[in-house]
């Protein structure tokens, strides 16, 4: 059995930027209120004509170029998203068509903000088993379309974007260890419960979140799973070069870093200018740090995040 390793990264953010000041013109909030509670200053919003697969395509093309491979080498596509283009077919199939690489396996993974890690672990297992050699793994979201823009508790938090990696087979370990978890008992504190029935939307089509409950659960779950992942991998906290967390809330990120004994200058933070981009946030942050030279080959990186479900996880890897 072989290993898998990240060969390249890519990302895409929509051109339109929505600042806190602009939001304050629409809803009862302020820049100070948002920043003090979340750490967010602005977020990107997808153009009306764009679909999630369009954002995924841009990120995928950047990752393919970064990896230095021919797109036809890709034999697996996994898209993590909670905002697909349509009920079906999957966004991965739509992305495959736009890339012009028919024939390989393509499917979506739905674990909301933890989706990219679930997708990455799935691709890793495909490669380790010999079922794939080059996997395109994408986290892509247009969260702005499931927000109630009159609800200041949620509309200030989220943004749109896409991030991607090319995962390839390797003789040396890239993904060192991973742990994934879920607990459906907490489904009511973070969800979008609508469904289509009889040609109509049944139930609330907007994102609902019990902020304090989510914060309390997330801080403990993320700290615990990060520590367990390192322990099971036999890696000391001091050996972690970078933490790349899900970008949900600055206080959650700071709490996790403190629990791991990592100073914030070893944590990749894109939250202030991007907000919470759900499944896209970890690959967006990873690509940002790879491209600006902070994350380099040979370094040890810990990815971790949590989302509705609840679903959460951590992935330890060697770049």
Image: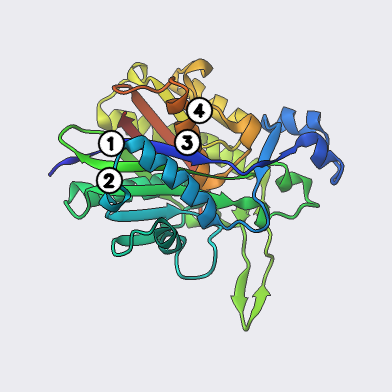
Q: Earlier in the sequence, mark 4 or mark 2?
A: 2
Disc 1 from disc 4: Cα separation: 21 Å
Q: Residue at x 64, y 44 (%)?
A: 159
- Quarter of the rendering containing residue 243: top left
Q: Which residue is mark 1?
A: 175
Which dot marks residue 132?
A: none
SS under mark 2: helix
Q: Earlier in the sequence, mark 1 or mark 4?
A: 1
Colour mode? rainbow
Q: Mark 1 or 3 closer to N-term? A: 1
Q: Nearer the viewer, residue 11 or 233?
A: 11
Q: Percent from the top left, x then y, of residue 80?
A: 45, 52
**Which residue position is annotated with label 2?**
124
Location of residue 194 (image quadrant): bottom right
Residue located 60% across and 71% down the image: 195
Q: Residue furthest bottom?
A: 198
| 95 lies left or right of 167 | right
Judging by the rendered image, the residue that carries numbered circle 3 is 222
Circle 4 residue: 256
First in sequence: mark 3 or mark 2?
2
117 vs 92, nearest the viewer: 92
Counting residues from the N terminus, which is met first, the one under dot 3 or under dot 4?
3
The image position of residue 91, as x and y in percent, is 47, 61
């Amino acid at each position: 059995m072989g290993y898998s390793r990240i060969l390249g990264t890519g990302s895409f953010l929509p051109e339109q930027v929505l600042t806190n000041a602009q939001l304050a013109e629409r809803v009862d909030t302020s820049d100070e209120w948002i920043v003090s509670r979340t750490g967010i200053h602005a977020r990107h919003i997808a153009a009306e004509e764009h679909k999630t697969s369009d954002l995924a395509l841009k990120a995928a093309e950047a990752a393919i170029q970064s990896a230095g491979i021919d797109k036809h080498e890709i034999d697996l596509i996994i898209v993590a998203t909670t905002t697909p283009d349509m009920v079906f077919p999957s966004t991965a199939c739509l992305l495959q068509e736009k890339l012009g690489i028919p024939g390989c396996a393509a499917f979506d993974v739905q674990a909301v903000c933890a989706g990219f890690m679930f997708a990455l672990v799935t691709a890793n297992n495909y490669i380790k088993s010999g079922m794939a050699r080059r996997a395109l793994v994408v986290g892509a979201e247009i969260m702005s379309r499931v927000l109630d823009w009159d609800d200041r508790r949620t509309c200030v938090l989220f943004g749109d974007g896409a991030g991607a990696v090319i995962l390839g087979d390797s003789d040396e370990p890239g993904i060192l260890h991973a742990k994934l978890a879920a607990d459906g008992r907490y489904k009511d504190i973070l969800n979008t419960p609508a469904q289509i029935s009889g040609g109509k939307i049944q139930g609330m089509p907007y994102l609902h979140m019990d902020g304090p409950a989510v914060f309390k659960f997330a801080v403990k779950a993320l700290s615990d799973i990060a520590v367990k992942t390192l322990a099971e991998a036999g890696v000391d906290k001091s050996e972690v070069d970078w933490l790349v967390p899900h970008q949900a809330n600055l206080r959650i990120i700071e709490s996790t870093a403190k629990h791991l004994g990592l100073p914030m200058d070893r944590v990749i933070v894109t939250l202030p200018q991007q907000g919470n981009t759900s499944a896209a946030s970890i690959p967006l942050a990873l690509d940002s740090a790879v491209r600006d030279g902070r994350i380099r080959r040979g370094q040890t990186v810990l990815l971790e995040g949590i989302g509705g479900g609840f679903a959460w996880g951590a992935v330890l890897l060697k770049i």
